[in-house]
Amino acid sequence: ASLFSAIEMAPRDPILGVTEAYNADKNPAKTNLGVGVYYDDNGKVPLLECVKKAEAELIAKLAPRTYLPIDGLATYDRAVQELVFGAGSAVVTEKRAITVQAVGGTGALKLGADFLKHFSAAGTEVWISDPSWENHRALFEMAGFKVNAYPYYDAATRGVNFAGMLDALKTMKSGSVVLLHACCHNPTGADLTDDQWTQVIEVVTSRSLVPFLDMAYQGFGDGIEEDGQVVRRFAEAGGPLFVSNSFSKSFSLYGERVGALSIAAASAEEAARVLSQLKRVVRTNYSNPPIHGGQVVATALASPELRKLWEDELAEMRVRIREMRQLLVAKLKEKAPAHDFDFVIKQRGMFSYSGLTKAQVDRLRNEFSIYAVDTGRICVAALNSKNIDVVVDAIAKVL
Ligand code: PMP
């Protein structure tokens, strides 16, 4: 037998599978709500003006492509840190935070996972929400962790099972890593309230759990500052803190792979030691990050004009998604008055756990060429003024 002869086929990625099926569908009226990407009202992935202008500046300079430092572009890391923790925050001004450019949000999570595997006590377990972004579990398992899930989504209330979540936090072993979505929970769209976060922070801190905040959608919930509040509150609570963030969505730079891992430590001296070890994780994985995407984001964030443009363009995306939520609910009220979809308006970010069952999702696909994830997750950012009526009519028929 050869090395490969006993290797089994890996399971298909459930989300990418939806897009494959969509691509193969010959119906010209087909609609893909299974994606995790923001589309504009014309159904296109936008190229932001702030990105175009930043790229024009970079092209005018035509700089040679040297290696970046192991931890990435310094101006990028600094800008990310201020965006994530707040420019005047104590962790930043006291130099207790470190930030390392990463290959997207996924790369940031993987750096954090590898670092934690190396430096946390043997047997440390990771907890993710039930459900969570489908890659969280696999990523931490591949890094060598046992991964558990804490209760999160409550199908009955279409909200968060907060009592269940809090109970689970209270039973985790001290030192356990808890992965939390800082805003715009993927896949459910259900976020905690400020008061619920207060309670979570209290339990996490008092029980010495290690919070790992994943923030892939900063600016898609209530605003850039508003969405960053949870990170800031955790940072103020003290204790070690991991934050992965991504610009894939907020800069519409998916393929450039721009993200970062930030860690808050107890002192500048501790942070320096953490950074030195984190750089070894980078060095032994891919040596140093790619240059282009980081430069684009750093250029846009450093220029007051481009930064304002970015904030406006991000606000436009956020507002459009909100409008689609409202339109979806209003139109469903008309076409399916017996069903209550008001929860869709309360959800945050690009996604909605629509409450559609697998059987209903199957019918949408087979009878109407409308593609959603089996769990009923739809991407609200894939709805637009042209496809919404088709989608609403079809949903009303399968309910
Ligand atoms: N975390 C969550 C919750 C996500 O939804 C995603 C991707 N959509 C990521 C991390 C990964 O981001 P990236 O595409 O930048 O790797």
Image (spheres, rainbow, N blue to C red):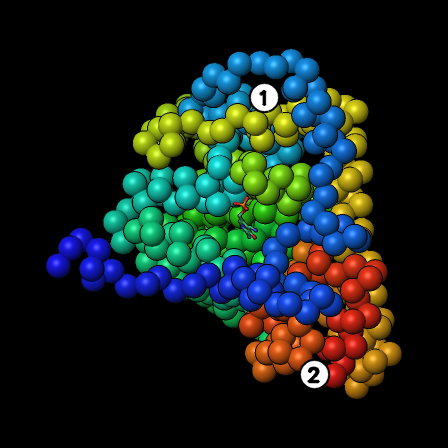
Front residue (pair 305, 218) = 305
Compared to 82, does 241 lie above or below? below
Q: Residues within 10 Å of mark 1 (few under 14, many from 20)?
A: some
Compared to 75, does 2 lie above or below? below
Q: For this view, does 145 lie left or right of residue 350? A: left
Is residue 352 among what the camera can see? no
Q: Position of residue 135 (x, y in %)?
A: 46, 55
Front residue (pair 11, 86) = 11
Number of numbered discs? 2
Amino acid, disc 1: Thr
> Could you tell me which quadrant the C terminus lies in?
bottom right
Compared to 10, does 338 lie above or below? below
The residue pinned by badge 2 equals: 398
Q: Residue at x 79, y 24 (%)?
A: 305
Front residue (pair 166, 249) = 249
Q: Which mark is on residue 270?
A: none
Q: Residue at x 72, y 43 (%)?
A: 46
Circle 2 SS class: helix
The residue pinned by badge 1 equals: 75
Amino acid, disc 2: Val
Q: Residue at x 58, y 58 (%)?
A: 186
Is residue 9 among what the camera can see? yes
Question: For the view shown, which residue lies furthest in the bottom direction?
Answer: 338
Compared to 197, does 276 lie above or below? above
Measure how far apart labels 2 and 1 are at the Cα level.
Answer: 51 Å
- Residue 229: quarter of image: top right
Q: Position of residue 193 (x, y in %)?
A: 67, 58
Q: Position of residue 152 (x, y in %)?
A: 54, 66
Marked residue nearer the N-terminal end (2 or 1): 1
Circle 1 SS class: helix
